[in-house]
Amino acid sequence: MSFSYLSHLECSATGERLDADVVQGVSAAGKPLLARYDLDAVRQAVTPEEIASRPHDLWRYHEVLPVRDPAHVTSLGEGMTPIVPLPTYGAAIGLPHLVMKDEGLVPTGSFKARGAAVGVSRARELGVRAVAMPTNGNAGAAWSVYAARAGMGSLIVMPVDAPEITRRECVVAGAELYLVDGLINHAGALVKAAVEERTGYQEVSTLKEPYRIEGKKTMGYEIAEQLGWEVPDVILYPAGGGVGLIGIHKAMKEMQELGWIGEQLPRLVCVQSTGCAPLVDAFDAGLDESTLVEGTHTLAFGINVPKALGDFLVLQAVRESGGTAIAVSDETILEEVGALARSEGAWICPEGAACMAAARELRASGWIGEQERVVVLNTGTGLKYPDTVGVDVPVLARDGRVPPA
Ligand SMILES: *Cc1c(COP(=O)(O)O)cnc(C)c1O
């Protein structure tokens, strides 16, 4: 019995095989590496019934995660987030079977903790001393927190406009943090140059190391397990770098090979903001890759990515699953944040709200049928974006009175 059945790494573009037991970045072709497992052995080693009895975190799927020694697992209890029914909101938009997987409840308040937990654990196992990354905020926060827990250092560069709370999260965890007057791609160039000058640092930018995606794919395993090893008809995902979407698709294919789910794949919807929609544009144009968009802007900061390294993988996953791609405006996103909180009590992040708006639009256009089972990923908590809600209320005098109802 092994804790992990990781066998090798594979170039996502050429299929080239690489050793998984040394620190790796991208392939010789400069493309993301995907972790591969001995799934025949996993099938013999564990059953879904056995998994059901394990602790409620993402490490319950350890056979298909890359960490070989349980002693290297760096965990704050991430994973197994609830699937929350949205009966009132769902009925209002014509989707009675709409549910939300609420990633606002993981440590650091965003699903970035999944990628960080698995990425940091594996980096620690392979002897990395410190991790370095550009970020739009949430990833940097998550990786600095997990690096601290693993006894590792972290070097983080984020745009000055990234949500302020994420700076504080980095600082409190002891990260070496820099702000840049630019976008995530500018931060990326600074990190790359810094890592070349330092020893013991690994660059862990989105898809420039192979294991963040493994953490994020656990959302796919959980969705299947929580729905009784059945997959929903549609999953909506707010895509920046697209790691979660690629990961969920990878999980689905692995589970098919394991015989844990049937032939049907969920249709994956790539949701972006109209202020930054390179993947949607590429999908609409029938292209295999996206084009860098200049001057992007959206309040859904986690999905402000002008050009993603894994763009071709997102487009492949969307097409192979029979899915689609759609962009919604920031104005609509803000309306949806309020609509969901008022009808269901859930304060979701703008990225999650973009997916709610997309579900509404795709139902209205008939792309999603009324009886379909739809899962929206809320990738973070609204609490991390306090400025998206204005408070304009009366102040009472001490000897004043509350107006009658
Ligand atoms: C990073 C982030 C996303 C986008 O994730 P990708 O894996 O880069 O596509 C979506 N929502 C939130 C809240 C994020 O922090």
Image (cartoon, rainbow, N blue to C red):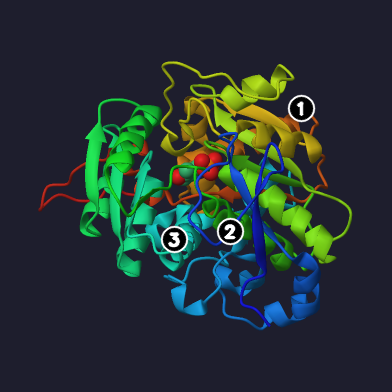
Mark 2 C-beta to ligand 1 under 8 Å: no
Name the spot of residue 41 as percent of width and height, x first: 77, 73
Which of the two discs, 1 and 2, labels the residue nearer the N terminus?
2
> On residue 123, which mark appears?
3
2 or 3: mark nearer the eye: 2
Q: Is mark 3 on a helix, strand or loop?
A: helix
Name the spot of residue 308 as percent of width and height, x first: 53, 31
Circle 1 Cα neighbour tier, 10 Å, few/some/many (<14 / 14–19 / ≥20)? few
Q: What element carries label 2?
A: loop
3 or 1: mark nearer the eye: 3
Observer-nearest of 139 and 382: 139
Q: Which amino acid does label 2 sit on?
A: Ala
Residue at image point 81% right, 66% down? 260
User: Is residue 62 placed above or below 291 in the rendered structure?
Assistant: below
Residue at image point 35% right, 30% down? 189
Circle 3 Cα neighbour tier, 10 Å, few/some/many (<14 / 14–19 / ≥20)? many
Q: Distance between the residues labelled 3 and 1?
A: 45 Å
> On residue 20, which mark appears?
2
Residue at image point 49% right, 35% down? 303
* Residue under numbered circle 1: 365
Place residue 188 in its image quadrant.
top left
Left or right of 166 on screen, residue 333 = right
Q: Distance between the residues labelled 1 and 2?
A: 45 Å
Image quadrant occupied by the N terminus: bottom right
User: Is residue 302 placed above or below 67 in the rendered structure?
Assistant: above
Can residue 391 be seen by looking at this rendering? Answer: no
Which of the two discs, 3 and 1, labels the residue nearer the N terminus?
3
Q: What residue type is labelled 1?
A: Ser
Mark 1 C-beta to ligand 1 under 8 Å: no
